[in-house]
Amino acid sequence: MELDTVDRRLIHALRVHPRVGFRELGAVLGISDQTAARRYRRLRERAGVRVVGLPNPIRLGYDKWIIRLHTAPDAAGPIAAALARRPDTTWVSILSGGTEIGCNVDSPAAAERDTLLLQKLPRTPRLVSVSAHCVIHNFAGGAVGPDRRDHPLSEEEVARLTQPPADPSRPARIADIDRPLLDALAVDARLTYPQLAAATGWSESAVRRRLDDLVAAGAVYFDVEVDPDRLGFHARVLLWLAVAPSRLVAVGTALAQHEEIVFAAATTGPTNIMATAICSDMAALYRYLTERVGALDGVERVETAPLLRHVKQVGAVRP
Protein backbone atom coordinates (compact mmCIF):
# COMPACT_ATOMS: atom_id res chain seq x y z
CA MET A 1 0.00 0.00 0.00
CA GLU A 2 1.39 3.39 -1.01
CA LEU A 3 0.63 6.35 1.23
CA ASP A 4 -0.58 9.54 -0.40
CA THR A 5 -0.54 13.09 0.96
CA VAL A 6 -3.83 12.67 2.84
CA ASP A 7 -2.51 9.53 4.55
CA ARG A 8 0.68 11.28 5.62
CA ARG A 9 -1.23 14.30 6.91
CA LEU A 10 -3.55 12.01 8.85
CA ILE A 11 -0.61 10.18 10.48
CA HIS A 12 0.98 13.50 11.42
CA ALA A 13 -2.34 14.66 12.92
CA LEU A 14 -2.52 11.52 15.07
CA ARG A 15 0.98 12.20 16.37
CA VAL A 16 -0.17 15.63 17.50
CA HIS A 17 -3.58 14.58 18.89
CA PRO A 18 -3.75 10.76 19.14
CA ARG A 19 -7.40 10.53 20.27
CA VAL A 20 -8.77 13.30 18.07
CA GLY A 21 -12.32 12.67 16.88
CA PHE A 22 -12.94 12.07 13.19
CA ARG A 23 -15.07 15.20 12.84
CA GLU A 24 -12.28 17.44 14.18
CA LEU A 25 -9.68 15.46 12.25
CA GLY A 26 -11.59 15.90 9.00
CA ALA A 27 -12.06 19.62 9.61
CA VAL A 28 -8.30 20.13 10.04
CA LEU A 29 -7.40 17.96 7.04
CA GLY A 30 -10.08 19.42 4.79
CA ILE A 31 -11.92 16.13 4.29
CA SER A 32 -15.23 14.75 5.57
CA ASP A 33 -15.37 12.89 8.87
CA GLN A 34 -16.45 9.77 6.95
CA THR A 35 -13.38 10.02 4.74
CA ALA A 36 -11.15 10.53 7.79
CA ALA A 37 -12.61 7.43 9.47
CA ARG A 38 -12.30 5.36 6.29
CA ARG A 39 -8.70 6.46 5.72
CA TYR A 40 -7.79 5.65 9.31
CA ARG A 41 -9.31 2.16 9.12
CA ARG A 42 -7.41 1.50 5.89
CA LEU A 43 -4.15 2.67 7.44
CA ARG A 44 -4.71 0.36 10.43
CA GLU A 45 -5.55 -2.65 8.31
CA ARG A 46 -3.09 -2.26 5.45
CA ALA A 47 -0.21 -0.10 6.72
CA GLY A 48 0.06 -1.15 10.36
CA VAL A 49 -0.75 2.30 11.77
CA ARG A 50 -1.79 2.08 15.41
CA VAL A 51 -2.19 4.56 18.26
CA VAL A 52 -1.19 3.21 21.67
CA GLY A 53 -1.25 4.57 25.20
CA LEU A 54 1.47 3.66 27.72
CA PRO A 55 2.54 4.54 31.26
CA ASN A 56 4.93 7.49 31.17
CA PRO A 57 8.11 6.10 32.75
CA ILE A 58 9.65 9.55 33.13
CA ARG A 59 6.76 11.06 35.12
CA LEU A 60 6.22 7.84 37.08
CA GLY A 61 9.89 7.52 38.00
CA TYR A 62 10.40 4.06 36.49
CA ASP A 63 13.84 2.63 35.90
CA LYS A 64 14.49 2.58 32.15
CA TRP A 65 16.94 0.08 30.69
CA ILE A 66 18.14 -0.63 27.18
CA ILE A 67 19.29 -4.23 26.89
CA ARG A 68 21.50 -5.77 24.20
CA LEU A 69 21.52 -9.53 23.85
CA HIS A 70 23.69 -11.71 21.60
CA THR A 71 22.28 -15.14 20.83
CA ALA A 72 23.01 -18.29 18.93
CA PRO A 73 21.98 -17.93 15.23
CA ASP A 74 18.65 -19.73 15.61
CA ALA A 75 17.67 -18.37 19.03
CA ALA A 76 17.01 -14.66 18.44
CA GLY A 77 13.42 -15.13 17.26
CA PRO A 78 12.10 -17.14 20.25
CA ILE A 79 13.96 -15.01 22.80
CA ALA A 80 12.73 -11.77 21.21
CA ALA A 81 9.16 -13.11 21.16
CA ALA A 82 9.35 -13.97 24.86
CA LEU A 83 10.63 -10.46 25.67
CA ALA A 84 7.87 -8.90 23.56
CA ARG A 85 5.21 -10.64 25.63
CA ARG A 86 6.42 -8.89 28.78
CA PRO A 87 4.30 -5.85 29.71
CA ASP A 88 7.40 -3.89 30.78
CA THR A 89 9.04 -3.92 27.32
CA THR A 90 8.15 -1.11 24.92
CA TRP A 91 10.19 -2.16 21.89
CA VAL A 92 11.95 -5.38 20.95
CA SER A 93 13.96 -5.62 17.73
CA ILE A 94 16.21 -8.13 16.01
CA LEU A 95 19.44 -6.47 14.88
CA SER A 96 22.58 -6.97 12.86
CA GLY A 97 22.86 -10.45 11.31
CA GLY A 98 19.94 -11.87 13.25
CA THR A 99 22.01 -12.80 16.30
CA GLU A 100 21.47 -9.61 18.31
CA ILE A 101 18.38 -8.32 20.09
CA GLY A 102 17.77 -4.80 21.34
CA CYS A 103 14.94 -4.00 23.73
CA ASN A 104 13.74 -1.33 26.13
CA VAL A 105 12.50 -2.24 29.61
CA ASP A 106 10.59 0.14 31.88
CA SER A 107 10.71 -1.23 35.43
CA PRO A 108 8.29 0.22 38.00
CA ALA A 109 10.01 -1.78 40.76
CA ALA A 110 13.63 -2.78 41.35
CA ALA A 111 12.56 -6.35 42.14
CA GLU A 112 11.12 -6.82 38.64
CA ARG A 113 14.31 -5.43 37.08
CA ASP A 114 16.51 -7.69 39.16
CA THR A 115 14.42 -10.76 38.37
CA LEU A 116 14.83 -10.14 34.66
CA LEU A 117 18.51 -9.15 34.64
CA LEU A 118 19.85 -11.41 37.37
CA GLN A 119 17.68 -14.50 37.10
CA LYS A 120 15.65 -14.95 33.92
CA LEU A 121 18.07 -13.74 31.25
CA PRO A 122 21.17 -15.50 32.62
CA ARG A 123 19.24 -18.79 32.61
CA THR A 124 17.95 -18.38 29.05
CA PRO A 125 19.25 -21.18 26.80
CA ARG A 126 21.38 -20.21 23.76
CA LEU A 127 21.89 -16.68 25.03
CA VAL A 128 25.55 -15.77 24.48
CA SER A 129 25.84 -12.41 26.27
CA VAL A 130 23.78 -9.64 27.86
CA SER A 131 24.62 -6.00 28.43
CA ALA A 132 22.26 -3.60 30.21
CA HIS A 133 22.43 0.17 29.90
CA CYS A 134 20.42 2.35 32.31
CA VAL A 135 18.77 5.36 30.66
CA ILE A 136 19.77 8.45 32.62
CA HIS A 137 18.25 11.14 30.37
CA ASN A 138 15.83 11.18 27.43
CA PHE A 139 16.52 13.57 24.54
CA ALA A 140 13.97 12.48 21.90
CA GLY A 141 11.22 9.98 21.22
CA GLY A 142 8.89 7.97 23.42
CA ALA A 143 7.39 9.96 26.29
CA VAL A 144 9.49 13.00 25.37
CA GLY A 145 7.38 13.57 22.26
CA PRO A 146 7.00 12.67 18.58
CA ASP A 147 9.96 12.73 16.22
CA ARG A 148 10.50 15.30 13.46
CA ARG A 149 10.23 13.11 10.38
CA ASP A 150 7.53 13.48 7.74
CA HIS A 151 5.59 16.48 9.07
CA PRO A 152 3.26 17.61 6.25
CA LEU A 153 0.82 19.63 8.39
CA SER A 154 1.18 23.40 8.50
CA GLU A 155 1.99 25.20 11.75
CA GLU A 156 -1.58 26.49 11.89
CA GLU A 157 -3.00 22.97 11.49
CA VAL A 158 -0.69 21.65 14.19
CA ALA A 159 -1.79 24.46 16.51
CA ARG A 160 -5.45 23.53 15.98
CA LEU A 161 -4.73 19.96 17.06
CA THR A 162 -2.30 20.63 19.91
CA GLN A 163 -3.63 19.75 23.35
CA PRO A 164 -2.79 21.40 26.68
CA PRO A 165 0.40 19.97 28.22
CA ALA A 166 0.29 17.80 31.31
CA ASP A 167 0.25 19.61 34.63
CA PRO A 168 3.53 18.83 36.44
CA SER A 169 2.03 19.94 39.76
CA ARG A 170 -0.48 17.08 39.69
CA PRO A 171 0.67 13.78 41.23
CA ALA A 172 1.32 11.11 38.59
CA ARG A 173 0.29 7.72 39.93
CA ILE A 174 -0.91 4.46 38.47
CA ALA A 175 -2.84 2.03 40.66
CA ASP A 176 -3.42 -1.71 40.29
CA ILE A 177 -7.05 -0.96 39.44
CA ASP A 178 -5.85 0.90 36.32
CA ARG A 179 -4.35 -2.26 34.76
CA PRO A 180 -7.39 -3.20 32.58
CA LEU A 181 -7.50 0.34 31.20
CA LEU A 182 -3.75 0.38 30.50
CA ASP A 183 -3.93 -3.05 28.87
CA ALA A 184 -6.65 -1.81 26.52
CA LEU A 185 -4.77 1.39 25.66
CA ALA A 186 -1.59 -0.59 24.89
CA VAL A 187 -3.51 -2.46 22.19
CA ASP A 188 -5.52 0.44 20.76
CA ALA A 189 -5.60 3.90 22.31
CA ARG A 190 -8.31 5.07 19.90
CA LEU A 191 -10.94 2.79 21.39
CA THR A 192 -14.10 4.75 22.13
CA TYR A 193 -15.26 5.28 25.70
CA PRO A 194 -17.98 2.59 25.32
CA GLN A 195 -15.31 0.17 24.04
CA LEU A 196 -12.97 1.03 26.91
CA ALA A 197 -15.85 0.59 29.35
CA ALA A 198 -16.50 -2.88 27.93
CA ALA A 199 -12.80 -3.76 28.18
CA THR A 200 -12.48 -2.60 31.80
CA GLY A 201 -15.89 -3.39 33.23
CA TRP A 202 -16.20 0.23 34.34
CA SER A 203 -18.89 2.74 33.47
CA GLU A 204 -18.25 5.12 30.57
CA SER A 205 -18.13 8.07 32.95
CA ALA A 206 -15.55 6.30 35.14
CA VAL A 207 -13.38 5.50 32.11
CA ARG A 208 -13.56 9.06 30.82
CA ARG A 209 -12.78 10.54 34.23
CA ARG A 210 -9.84 8.23 34.96
CA LEU A 211 -8.31 8.56 31.49
CA ASP A 212 -8.61 12.34 31.65
CA ASP A 213 -6.89 12.31 35.06
CA LEU A 214 -4.02 10.08 33.87
CA VAL A 215 -3.39 12.19 30.77
CA ALA A 216 -3.69 15.53 32.61
CA ALA A 217 -1.12 14.37 35.18
CA GLY A 218 1.20 13.04 32.48
CA ALA A 219 1.01 9.49 33.87
CA VAL A 220 0.05 8.19 30.41
CA TYR A 221 1.42 9.22 27.04
CA PHE A 222 0.42 8.28 23.50
CA ASP A 223 2.50 7.16 20.56
CA VAL A 224 1.80 6.17 16.96
CA GLU A 225 3.13 2.98 15.44
CA VAL A 226 3.77 3.06 11.72
CA ASP A 227 5.94 0.99 9.43
CA PRO A 228 8.78 3.35 8.36
CA ASP A 229 9.03 1.52 5.03
CA ARG A 230 5.55 2.86 4.18
CA LEU A 231 6.86 6.39 4.60
CA GLY A 232 9.93 5.74 2.45
CA PHE A 233 12.44 5.10 5.25
CA HIS A 234 14.15 1.80 4.45
CA ALA A 235 17.35 2.09 6.52
CA ARG A 236 16.74 1.69 10.27
CA VAL A 237 19.81 1.61 12.48
CA LEU A 238 20.59 1.72 16.18
CA LEU A 239 23.50 4.00 17.00
CA TRP A 240 25.71 3.62 20.07
CA LEU A 241 27.79 6.78 20.55
CA ALA A 242 30.77 7.34 22.82
CA VAL A 243 30.71 11.05 23.65
CA ALA A 244 33.01 13.16 25.81
CA PRO A 245 31.08 13.73 29.08
CA SER A 246 31.44 17.51 28.78
CA ARG A 247 29.68 17.35 25.38
CA LEU A 248 26.92 14.91 26.30
CA VAL A 249 24.17 17.52 26.63
CA ALA A 250 25.18 19.35 23.46
CA VAL A 251 25.37 16.18 21.35
CA GLY A 252 22.10 14.75 22.70
CA THR A 253 20.30 18.04 22.13
CA ALA A 254 21.65 18.28 18.59
CA LEU A 255 20.58 14.71 17.77
CA ALA A 256 17.06 15.50 18.99
CA GLN A 257 16.82 18.20 16.31
CA HIS A 258 17.74 15.80 13.47
CA GLU A 259 14.76 14.54 11.49
CA GLU A 260 16.58 11.21 11.07
CA ILE A 261 16.47 10.55 14.83
CA VAL A 262 13.35 8.95 16.27
CA PHE A 263 14.83 8.15 19.69
CA ALA A 264 17.87 9.36 21.63
CA ALA A 265 18.88 8.93 25.26
CA ALA A 266 21.94 9.19 27.49
CA THR A 267 22.85 5.86 29.05
CA THR A 268 25.36 4.19 31.30
CA GLY A 269 27.95 1.86 29.80
CA PRO A 270 31.01 1.99 27.51
CA THR A 271 28.96 4.14 25.11
CA ASN A 272 26.85 6.90 26.64
CA ILE A 273 24.23 7.82 24.00
CA MET A 274 21.92 5.38 22.26
CA ALA A 275 19.85 6.61 19.31
CA THR A 276 17.65 5.19 16.57
CA ALA A 277 18.14 6.69 13.12
CA ILE A 278 15.80 6.17 10.17
CA CYS A 279 16.91 7.16 6.67
CA SER A 280 15.60 6.62 3.15
CA ASP A 281 18.35 4.13 2.30
CA MET A 282 21.87 3.12 3.27
CA ALA A 283 23.40 5.81 1.09
CA ALA A 284 21.42 8.43 3.02
CA LEU A 285 22.51 6.81 6.27
CA TYR A 286 26.15 7.06 5.15
CA ARG A 287 25.73 10.77 4.47
CA TYR A 288 23.98 11.27 7.78
CA LEU A 289 26.74 9.54 9.75
CA THR A 290 29.65 11.17 7.97
CA GLU A 291 28.26 14.66 7.47
CA ARG A 292 26.06 15.26 10.52
CA VAL A 293 26.85 12.82 13.32
CA GLY A 294 30.57 12.81 12.61
CA ALA A 295 30.62 16.60 12.58
CA LEU A 296 29.27 16.88 16.15
CA ASP A 297 31.97 18.06 18.53
CA GLY A 298 32.58 15.48 21.23
CA VAL A 299 31.57 12.33 19.32
CA GLU A 300 34.53 9.98 19.72
CA ARG A 301 33.14 6.72 18.37
CA VAL A 302 29.94 5.42 16.74
CA GLU A 303 28.79 1.81 16.60
CA THR A 304 25.94 0.92 14.25
CA ALA A 305 23.54 -2.03 14.34
CA PRO A 306 21.03 -2.34 11.46
CA LEU A 307 17.51 -3.07 12.62
CA LEU A 308 16.19 -6.10 10.74
CA ARG A 309 12.76 -6.59 12.26
CA HIS A 310 10.53 -5.14 14.95
CA VAL A 311 9.07 -7.89 17.11
CA LYS A 312 7.40 -5.29 19.29
CA GLN A 313 7.37 -1.68 18.21
CA VAL A 314 5.65 0.39 20.90
CA GLY A 315 2.40 -1.03 22.22
CA ALA A 316 1.36 -4.54 23.18
CA VAL A 317 2.02 -7.31 20.69
CA ARG A 318 -0.79 -7.20 18.16
CA PRO A 319 -3.45 -9.88 18.61
Image (cartoon, rainbow, N blue to C red):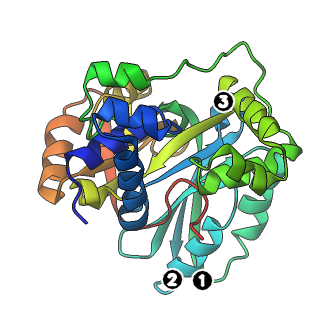
Question: Is 255 on the left or on the right of 60, as rendered?
Answer: left
For the question of whether residue 15 can be seen, the reply is no
Q: Amino acid at mark 1?
A: Arg
User: In the image, what residue occupies the spot 25% across and 45% down?
Assistant: 6
Q: Position of residue 19 (x, y in %)?
A: 53, 38
User: In the image, what residue occupies the spot 67% across and 28% down?
Assistant: 59
Tell me, yes or no, whether the two marked residues, 2 and 1, touch with CB atoms within 8 Å. yes
Residue to which mark 3 is pinned:
215
For the question of whether residue 278 can be seen, the reply is yes
Where is the N terminus found, in terms of image quarters? Answer: bottom left
Q: CA distance from mark 3 to mark 2?
A: 42 Å
Q: Amino acid at mark 3?
A: Val
Q: CA distance from mark 2 to mark 1?
A: 5 Å
Secondary element under disc 2, as helix, strand or loop, is: loop
Q: Residue lying at the far top in this picture: please name it.
A: 169
Q: CA distance from mark 3 to mark 1?
A: 41 Å
Q: Dot 2: few (<14), some (14–19), or many (≥20) neighbours within 10 Å?
A: some
Which one is in front, 294 or 260?
260
Residue to which mark 1 is pinned:
126
Residue to which mark 2 is pinned:
72
